[in-house]
Amino acid sequence: MMLLSRRSLLGIAAVVDVALHARPQPVAAKLLAARHALPPRHLETLLQALVRAGILKGVRGPRGGYELARERRRITAGDIVRAAMQDGSEDTLGPMPHSPLIDGVIAPEVETASTAFLSTLDGITVEELCRRATEKAAAHDDGSNPNFTI
């Protein structure tokens, strides 16, 4: 079962993609969206949330795009998920429900589980994910390329 929201998973993928491809030039949102089979405008709000969180840096101009705002080893999956969740698009769901059952029993348990989940993600750096992606690509050097490009 996938515990991450689609937005959070995409956020991690986008940051790792930028970490792998942002040299020597920033990664254009259009290329990033194409690699993940998304319309660019769908990805843009997430990328802006990552910029506001200090994870990515936007570079303007004809050769602009996105690059990491800090070193790979200083960005965790937990940082990315928090940024993605903070700017989430759940406004259409209406107000959060409240009841003695939710407030006294369910919410504290969900909060404990969320904290444990994010704590685990805090132990995973973008540097580690990039290393694994590079190893995976090297292992598929026989022409059977995995579903990502490096």
Image (cartoon, helix red, strand yellow):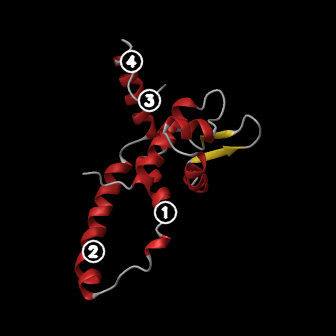
* Labels 3, 2: front one: 3
Q: What residue does disc 3 label? A: 148
* Labels 4, 2: front one: 4
Q: What residue does disc 1 label? A: 88
Q: In what element is the residue under mark 4?
A: helix
Mark 1 or mark 3, which has the lower sequence index?
1
User: Residue 31 location, x and y as percent?
Assistant: 59, 35
Q: Is residue 110 positioned above or below 60 on the image?
A: below
Mark 4 or mark 1, which has the lower sequence index?
1
Disc 4 to disc 2, C-alpha distance: 44 Å
Q: Are marks 4 and 3 in contact (CB under 8 Å)?
A: no
Q: What residue does disc 4 label? A: 138
Task: Identify the residue shown where x is 40% and y is 29%.
Answer: 147
Mark 4 or mark 2, which has the lower sequence index?
2
User: Residue 101 location, x and y as percent?
Assistant: 23, 84
Q: Is residue 65 positioned above or below 104 on the image?
A: above
